Image (tube, rainbow, N blue to C red):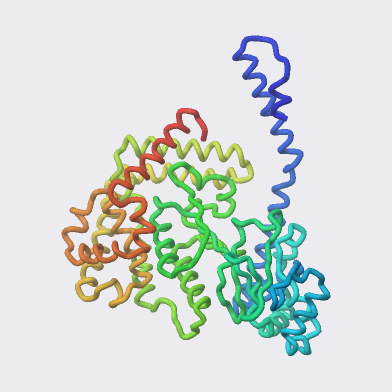
Amino acid sequence: MVIKAMNTYVEGSASFRLRKKLSTCRHELIDWNHRHFGHLDTKMNLVKNELESIQVQMAKLKVPTEYLISKETQRRRRNTIARLKDANGVELVQRDDIGRQFVSYFTGLFSSTSPELDEPFLQVWCARNVARLELIKPSPRKTIFRASHMVKEFNQVCISSDQRQVRLSHTISVGWKPPPSTLDKTQFRWVGQRLGGVIVEQIMQLYHHPYSLDSQKVRLALEEKGIDYTSYHVNPLTGKNMDSFFFRMNTTANLPVFQNGAHVLVDTIDIIEYIERIKILSSGFESDIVSNSEVKEWMEKIQRWNPKLFTLSHIPDKYRLFVSKFLRRVVIARMAQSPDLASVYHLKLKDAYVTEDKLKDPDALKESEEELIRLLDEVESQLSETSYLVGGEFTMADVMLIPLLARIELLGLEDQYINCRPHIVEYLKVVKQRPSYKAVIGKYFSGWRKYKTLLKTWLFVCIRNVLRKY
């Protein structure tokens, strides 16, 4: 289509011919896009409604893992095992031979009274396109109850993404490789966690960026808990959080956004508490408890302080105004690209002007600074009695505090707010040695790295502004 448009004969000067061909190419691509994706919004609304029905269904469940157990059973029924190695290493490809091999190893299993046990047991899940609608439908309570009882008889069947095997027991394994056209590696990955009596492996996605203070908090929690996830950088200074795909998922355009299957969380404290529950379920120790009341109190206290005005007020005006103007143009461009979201984009545009007005208000800036000073004084007082913010162990309260202190250092204000508080200074030296700090903050803002991180974004914004690519 592009070649055809560029080969069109046009009379006139060289610049006119090029401009005319590019215009023709653009119109052809717009028509092609409309023909193929003209009803995409309707389909997305249908999927959205189905996802909302799933959330309503899961809200009624007593145990959240019941839904995961049911879906795990459905997934194993999507694709049959293609080959199996016996004890001598000989590959069996015929279904009858595979069935006899299973009978020889699991004679007791096939004498079960469950009439559906043999079929799900011989099958594993493959994410076929035709099955996606079935996967997002909520399961009735009867199906969930039956699946929870059947899973107990599966003898820990799970899939290994590293070795590409279905492990059925300690004595037998089945080679398994998903078809490349049916498995999206960015959407599904198996990590081997035990939830509710069954080994469930589901990818979790985090949309974040190192510039975002709340993103750093969530990433620190994930690193401290050792939970695997897929990372997606959404740079707020280049307006990536205003793209329609992200804006439909989170109309506030704030970072981070945490997605686990049908669950989408945007509140920082809610995400961290959800991470804690995942860690408890995956560890298998039901006696573990999440953060106590004192930890939650500190988390909420730190989260109440909004660092936006404080950060922007300490950035040189020429840089801040340049980026602010660029982001407003990005919002206007996205508004034109997605008319159905125009009203929500307009609110973001209004918020940008409100923020500019607050930055001109000395009282608002003074109030934000005084709130920070009060918070740091409370932290200093607490650290004079304990090694960490709550007791002698590292908790999620420390996860909330560390990015705040790192932001003060990044702005070059440590002499004014940190160095005058000796207990915070010692505390910061200790936490900087933690692997989570080095992976989340030190990797981007330690020493010369901060100049590399900031310069990369600044050049990108300048180039897009010159080319008017918003």
Percent from the top left, x then y, of residue 300? Answer: 38, 68
* Quarter of the image that includes the N terminus: top right
Percent from the top left, x then y, of residue 466? Answer: 45, 28
143 left or right of 414 in image? right
Percent from the top left, x then y, of residue 395? Answer: 36, 72
Percent from the top left, x then y, of residue 326? Answer: 44, 36
Q: Quadrant of residue 455?
A: top left
Query: Going 33% across and 72% down the picture, which residue do you hit?
Result: 394
Is residue 370 positioned above or below 465 on the image?
Answer: below
Query: Going 73% across and 15% down the picture, which residue do you hit?
Result: 9
All told, the count of numbered labels is 0
What residue occupies the far front of the structure in this picture? Answer: 88
Is residue 196 positioned above or below 48 on the image?
Answer: below
Q: Quadrant of residue 181?
A: bottom right
What residue occupies the far top of the structure in this picture? Answer: 12
Query: Going 41% across and 39% down the picture, which residue do you hit?
Result: 324
Q: Quadrant of residue 303?
A: bottom left
Q: Which residue is nearer to you in this view: 298 or 220?
A: 220
Query: Going 47% across and 44% down the picture, which residue do you hit?
Result: 350
Is residue 267 positioned above or below 237 on the image?
Answer: below
433 left or right of 125 in image? left
Is residue 210 positioned above or below 93 on the image?
Answer: above
Q: Which residue is nearer to you in this view: 127 or 419?
A: 127
Q: Which residue is nearer to you in this view: 275 or 435?
A: 435
Q: Which residue is nearer to you in this view: 226 or 238?
A: 226
